[in-house]
Image (tube, helix red, strand yellow):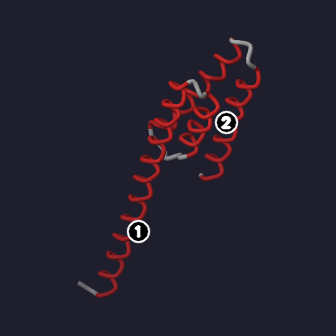
Amino acid sequence: MKPWLRAALVGAGIAIAIVGAAAIRMVWLGRAALADGDAARKRGDLPAAIDAWRAAARDYLPFAPHVDAAYDRLATAAREAETAGDPATALAAWRAIRSASRIERSRR
């Protein structure tokens, strides 16, 4: 095998390994943030849950299930707060969706 081809293959392998490791880290962090938000919700700490779900939504990776789940939880929290007459919490949840989606869009 020619030396330049070997170097190119090694370089490509290293690049693939780095991208793969970064993708695994994003999924791991997103799932952890989603679980943190769920735990905060169970404790009754909705502001902490919203912050954690926003973090999960920000850990964007195409086709990663934690992203859609985080947006769903944020939207549900916002609607429930609106129904309960808590506009401050509803606004915090809607703003979390907006800020997470703006960060997500800027990464693409």
Q: For the residue carrying disc 1, how many other residues have a C-alpha within 10 Å: few (<14), some (14-19), or many (20+)?
A: few
Looking at the image, which is closer to me, 24 or 36?
36
Q: Residue at x 49, y 37 (%)?
A: 36
Instruction: Count how many numbered circles sit on residues in the image.
Output: 2
Where's residue 11, x and y in %? 38, 75
Q: For the residue carrying disc 2, how many other residues have a C-alpha within 10 Å: few (<14), some (14-19), or many (20+)?
A: many
Looking at the image, which is closer to me, 60 or 46?
46
Q: Quadrant of residue 74?
A: top right
Residue 62 in the image: above or below residue 9: above
Where's residue 106, x and y in %? 66, 51
Where's residue 84, x and y in %? 69, 12
Which mark is on residue 96? 2
Mark 1: amino acid: Ala
Where's residue 104, x and y in %? 61, 46
CA gap, disc 1 to disc 2? 33 Å
Mark 2: amino acid: Ala
Which mark is on residue 87? none
Q: Quadrant of residue 16?
A: bottom left
Outermost residue on the bottom side: it is 3
Outermost residue on the left side: it is 1
Looking at the image, which is closer to me, 28 or 11?
28
Secondary structure of the residue carrying numbered label 2: helix
Q: Residue at x 49, y 47 (%)?
A: 61
Q: Nearer the viewer, mark 1 or mark 2?
A: 2
Q: Is 82 on the left or on the right of 31, as rendered? A: right
Q: Residue at x 32, y 81 (%)?
A: 5
Q: Is 108 on the left or on the right of 10, as rendered? A: right
**Mark 1 = which residue?**
15
C-beta proximity under 8 Å, tags 1 and 2: no
Q: Quadrant of residue 21?
A: bottom left
